[in-house]
Image (spheres, helix red, strand yellow):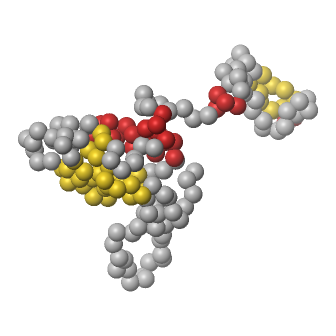
Amino acid sequence: MSDNDLSLAVTNDNDLERQSTDDLALDTIVLPFENVSNDNDLERQPTDDLALDTIILPFECGKSFTTYSELEKVVKAYENTHFAVLVKVKSEKWPEGHKNRETLVYKTLVYACKKGQNRHKSEAKGIRPNVTSGKLGCRFKLKISSNRGALVVKEAALDHTGHELT
């Protein structure tokens, strides 16, 4: 048997052994799946200790967050479960020394999808080749403002338009 007739396989002991191409397709790597008992184990599980309703409907109007870090956790959980990237497009922080600066951080905050609207008009002269920005006109928008010691969702347009969430 020549070296060309061999491919590499990984066994359950994580030892490397050579097998002939009759047993495996050329360049196939076989990995053990001992820790997976069924297809349900492969489903995405929430990583934070957030309530299930927070992950499913995290941004309904009137929902309040007692701290900015709590809001950040919910935003990250939303991004992970919906395969979306949210960016801050407008914000106003509390001034230094204000009592809400430590916990709430922001007076107002607006999140949008990364694939949202272009915020400026191009002044290009057409000299260099065109490069697209990746903006697809997604209308996702989340407006949050401070109210009585909490960050409150004031407007929530949660539909991603113009692109697939993958």
Residue 70 shown left or right of residue 129 in the figure: left
| Nearer to me, 142 or 5 | 142
Percent position of residue 4, x then y? 84, 37
Q: Tell me the residue at 81%/25% (across/down).
A: 18
Residue 9 shown left or right of residue 146 in the figure: right
**Above/below status of 75 relative to 120:** above
Percent position of residue 155, x then y? 34, 56
Q: Quadrant of residue 10?
A: top right
The answer to whether one can see residue 161 in this image is: yes
In the displayed orientation, state which residue is furthest to the left. Answer: 97
Q: Tell me the residue at 70%/23% (across/down).
A: 37
In the displayed orientation, state which residue is furthest to the front. Answer: 62
Percent position of residue 75, x then y? 39, 43
Q: Quadrant of the N terminus?
A: top right
Percent position of residue 19, x then y? 84, 26
Q: Quadrant of residue 125?
A: bottom left
Q: Tell me the residue at 71%/27% (across/down).
A: 38
**Above/below status of 108 relative to 44:** below
The answer to whether one can see residue 15 in this image is: no
Count of numbered circles on the image: 0
| Nearer to me, 18 or 152 | 152
**Above/below status of 162 relative to 33:** below
Residue 88 shown left or right of residue 128 in the figure: left
Residue 21 shown left or right of residue 107 in the figure: right
